[in-house]
Structure formats: structure tokens, C-alpha cells
Image: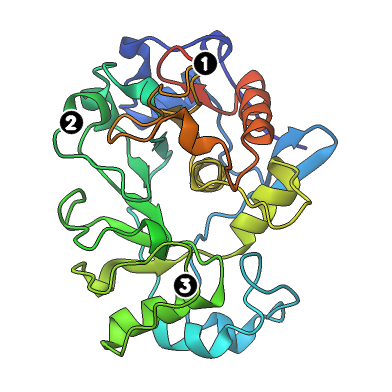
Amino acid sequence: MACIVYCALAKSPVSLSSARPSPSREVCVNCAWIVLKCTLFVLYDSCSIRRQTRLFLKLDDFFWRERLSRLALPYGIKGSEQILMKVLAASARFPDLECRTCVVIGNGFSIKNTSLGSIINKYDVVFRLNDAPVRGYEDDVGNKTSMRLFYPESASSNPTLHNEPETLMVLVPFKLQDLRWLKEILYNEKRIRKGFWKPPPLIWLGDPSKIRVLDPHFLHQTAERLVLLFQKPVHPTTGILAVFIALNYCDVVHIAGFGYPQSNNQKHPIHYYGYDTMRSMKNSYHDLNHEAVALKKLEDAGAILYLHPHL
């Protein structure tokens, strides 16, 4: 059975004082939810989702894992084995904590002017998405980054600008070209531009030792078990994927910067940075309604907690 413990705060937006995640043990016991040694978590309707805390593919997977693999990218690695064997680095380890408090920072306009930065920096693990900037926005989004999920089209050519030296850059491979791009970066090979909906960086100034490749298991489970997306080519957003990863890896999961303005004003900004507006979401590749329902169910179950009021 699932092991879920949450307090009354889980039913309403949390105040800044109660959102402070340290000490970790106190937060785990008194708020949000706690998994500890439970092997199953979140009874999502009639579907139990098994917790998996190892996030990244490793080279030794190819010597013992029998599941290599019935599914191709983005939900498996069938057909990608040779490239993966060249690009995989040793799996990194965060310090073993009695309880991990985590926050997932979305890129939404809702986090603007919240002054959450100092609160965000106190979490054990901070997830960020794509190329969302930190410099210049520290008051609202903080500056600590433990993991940044990205794909080639959303990569920044100089990840040192908005990340820390120890930040793990986690590639989410949606297609074989994504792995080829990473291999070309790592081995300084000739770049191939074909196969991308937006040109990825040809030069990447990050630390290769900090690159990890996310196990496609997580995108597959996010799509089929959490967001309930069965139609193709629609796939989950990086944001909802990061929430699912956090639910696997962490004991306490808070989120901020999620949701889109419920406004008919097509000029309304959608991010806390930049100039994209609601008009740019008109032909979205993602099913945002399904994702909003999924987040609401997780919130109602006490599995996640918002750090600010939201619609």
C-alpha cells in the first residue's frame, strides 16, 4: 500500500514561514508527505506508481539489464544503445540524507514578484527546467540549482551563466538525434543540424562530467501513469516530468512557477522572463489540460505543495 502522510497545509497554499525546508527531518514528519522505506507511492486513481530513486542511465546497465529495450525513445532506448554507450558518464550521487526536501521551479509567470528566492535556496534539491535564467531573477527564483532538465533545443550554449559548478545537467532524450547531439558535443565531432525543430547550440561550454542522461522510464511513466497521455506525438512537458522525478527521488516535494494564466488576453506573459505570451501556446505540442488535472490530483492527495497561491 502507499505510504502518504500530509498535514492540513497540503490543502491550501503554504505560507513562506512554513515552507522553509530545514531541518529536513522536521519538514518530512510535520508536512507534505513522507515515503521513507515504502516501495509504493501515490495511489493515482486505481493505479499505483512504483518509486524509483535511481534517475540516470549508467554504462553498466548495458551489461545486465534485460529490459534493453522494447521501447524506442522517448520511452525506451531501443536502437540507441551504441550511442548511449559512448556518452554515458558515471552516475553522480547526492549526499545520503535521512529525508530529501525538494522543490521544482517551473518557468511560469506566477512565480514573478513572489520573493521566494531565499526560501527556494534552503531546499536540499532544486530542480530547474530548460534554459530558464537565474541571474537577475534571484529574488523570486533563488540561485541554487541541483539538477537542470533540458533537451538540445532548450539547451543554453553557456550553462555556467545560470547554474552552479556542481549542477547536474540532465538530458531528456526525446529522439535519437538528441543523443547524437550530445555525442558530437562530448567528442567534438562534426555537428549535424538536421532532425531538430529548433537549432540546438553548436558549441556547449558546460562541464562534460556534469552531464547525465535521464532514464526514459521516467518520461514513459509520466505519460502513461501520471498524465495519462496515450495519443502520439503528444509528450509530457519538462515541468510535469520534473515533478514526477521529484516524487521518485524526494521525500518532500514542493513546486512553484507552474500553471498558465487563465486569461483570454493573448498578450499575457507566460514566463517570469522573456517575451513569450499566451499566443505562443496556441499550437502547443503538449496537452496542458491533462497536466493541470494531474497536478491538481497530486495536490489534493498531499503529494505536492505549492509555495504560492495559484489558480
Q: Position of residue 207 (x, y in %)?
A: 21, 69
- Badge 2, how many Cα within 10 Å: few under 14, some, many 20+? some
Q: Position of residue 174 (x, y in %)?
A: 55, 65
Q: Which residue appears at 60% of the width and 55% of the height?
A: 52
Left or right: 84, with 118 as reference point: right
User: Could you say which is closer to the camera, residue 25 or residue 307?
Assistant: 307
Q: Residue 119 shows which numbered tag?
A: none
Residue corresponding to mark 1 = 263
Residue corresponding to mark 3 = 178
- Of marks 2 and 3, the one in the foreground: 3
Up-down relation of residue 100 to residue 30 (above or below): below
Kindly indicate the quadrant of the structure image that contains residue 240.
top right
Residues at badges 1 and 3 in contact (C-beta under 8 Å)? Answer: no
Quadrant (top left, top right, bottom left, bottom right) of the N terminus? top right
Chain-order first, disc 2 or disc 3 = 2
Amino acid type shown at disc 3: Asp
Residue corresponding to mark 2 = 138
Amino acid type shown at disc 2: Glu
The Cα atoms of the two marked residues, 1 and 2, are separated by: 27 Å
Q: Which residue appears at 70% of the width and 78% of the height?
A: 69
Kindly indicate the quadrant of the structure image that contains residue 284.
top right
Left or right: 75, with 185 as reference point: right
